[in-house]
Image (tube, helix red, strand yellow):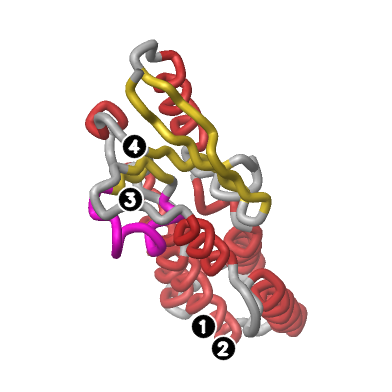
Amino acid sequence: MGIFAYLGASVLFILNIFLIISNRVWKNIQEYKMPVLCFLFSIFVVIGYNLAGRYTSYYKWTAILPMLLGLLLWSRNVKQKINTAIIGITSLILLVAFVIKYPLYGETPCDRIKAFVEKQNFKPTDRIAAPFCTFYALKPTNRFTYFYQIYPQNLIGDVDYIIIPTSDKEYSYNKAGMNKYLNEKQKDTRLCVEKIDFSLNPNIALYKITKK
């Protein structure tokens, strides 16, 4: 499931499981029902989005937020001092990790994606197949943008450009499907597929599709 590709989500998940077991929640479910319900809701969200085939990095907050809320509730409910210390240390680690990943000042990953997209000077009528990380950069100006994680690839049809992630660590959700789509276009003898630009930060490449 896509959510567990993110370290913060994995840490929260493991911590919630640890707290459920260490506090023997099943013996006093009434006392711990709220943090447990928050945790179960986050699991339901993950399963629901994956069944719908639409769990992308933009939606991870819908699972992480309930687990964070549950963590706050745990801090009020737990009796053992060791559990309180673990919750506090974990919260600090997550805060530091978040600030490192998304600095309060300077360029963010979204800013770099937007700069890459703006540099291409796409026309409003261009048809573009792209990963969902480009949603906010492309959708306001290019209505004919098709995202691999949403549109079935057989319904995308002809496109003028394809944007592909080039790293296994970034934007990797459904990367196999994106590469398959590009390979199909490259094998089509009626088309010319040319790599016209790439970026190392963010790790994405741009291909232009023209008919021979």
Determine which residue is flagged by label 1: 73
Determine which residue is flagged by label 4: 160
Q: Secondary structure at mark 2?
A: helix
> What residue is rendered at 77% in x and 79% in y?
82
Contact (Cβ within 8 Å) of mark 4 with mark 1:
no
Of pointers 3 and 2, the one earlier in the residue sequence: 3
Q: Residue furthest bottom?
A: 76
Q: Which class describes the residues within 10 Å of circle 4: few (<14), some (14-19), or many (20+)?
A: some
Q: Secondary structure at mark 4?
A: loop
Residue range in magenta is: 132-144
Contact (Cβ within 8 Å) of mark 2 with mark 1:
yes
Of pointers 4 and 3, the one earlier in the residue sequence: 3
- Residue 161 vs 138, above or below: the answer is above
Residue 143 magenta:
yes
Where is residue 211 shown, x and y percent of the image?
33, 22
Q: Nearer the viewer, residue 200 or 60?
A: 200
Q: CA distance from mark 4 to mark 3?
A: 33 Å
Which mark, residue 76?
2
Which mark, residue 195?
none
Front position among marks 3 and 2: 3
Determine which residue is flagged by label 3: 48
The amino acid type of the residue labelled 1 equals Leu
Which image quarter: residue 97? Answer: bottom right
The amino acid type of the residue labelled 3 equals Gly
Where is residue 28 shown, x and y percent of the image?
49, 73
Q: CA distance from mark 4 to mark 1?
A: 50 Å
The amino acid type of the residue labelled 2 equals Arg
Where is residue 212 shown, x and y percent of the image?
35, 18
- Residue 63 vs 198, above or below: the answer is below
Front position among marks 2 and 4: 4
Contact (Cβ within 8 Å) of mark 4 with mark 3:
no
